[in-house]
Amino acid sequence: MFEVEDALNKFETSILKSIDKENMKKILIFLKEQQVDYIEDILNEYIDLFLIDYKDFIKRIEKLNQKYEGQFWVKAKENASLLEELLYEI
């Protein structure tokens, strides 16, 4: 389960302050619509993904889905480090 207290201890304050709540909400809804069943893991380990603007996030996902033949979320579940590819321009 995602624990706010853990996030406060794990991530730099500047990162947490930089997260736009509406943007984060859009990304979380998108992840649910994509049936990503490891959202809590993403929140716990890759919260900086929520710094990416929603529209840019979607574009990056589309490119990664092409790269991984439509299987990005499946592959990322098997190897969470693939999520780091979202942090870089593709």
Image: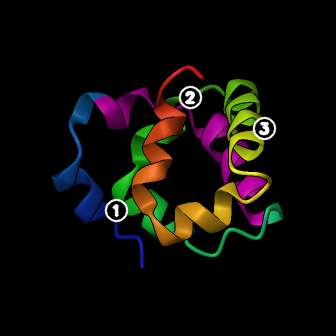
Residue tagged 3: 62
Residue 37 lies in magenta, yes or no? no
Pinpoint residue 24: horizontal percent, then vertical percent: 61, 43
Out of 53 and 59, give the one closest to the viewer: 59
Q: Which residues are magenta?
A: 15-32
Q: Residue at x 19, y 53 (%)?
A: 10
Residue 25 lies in magenta, yes or no? yes
Image: 37 above or below 44: below
Q: How many numbered discs, if any?
A: 3
Q: Secondary structure at mark 1?
A: helix
Residue tagged 2: 52
Identity of the amino acid at label 2?
Ile
Q: CA distance from mark 2 to mark 1?
A: 20 Å
Residue ranking furthest to the top: 89
Image: 82 above or below 55: below
Labels 3, 2: front one: 3
Q: CA distance from mark 3 to mark 2?
A: 14 Å
Q: Secondary structure at mark 2?
A: loop
Q: Is residue 8 left or right of residue 21?
A: left
Residue tagged 1: 4
Q: Secondary structure at mark 3?
A: helix
Identity of the amino acid at label 3?
Glu
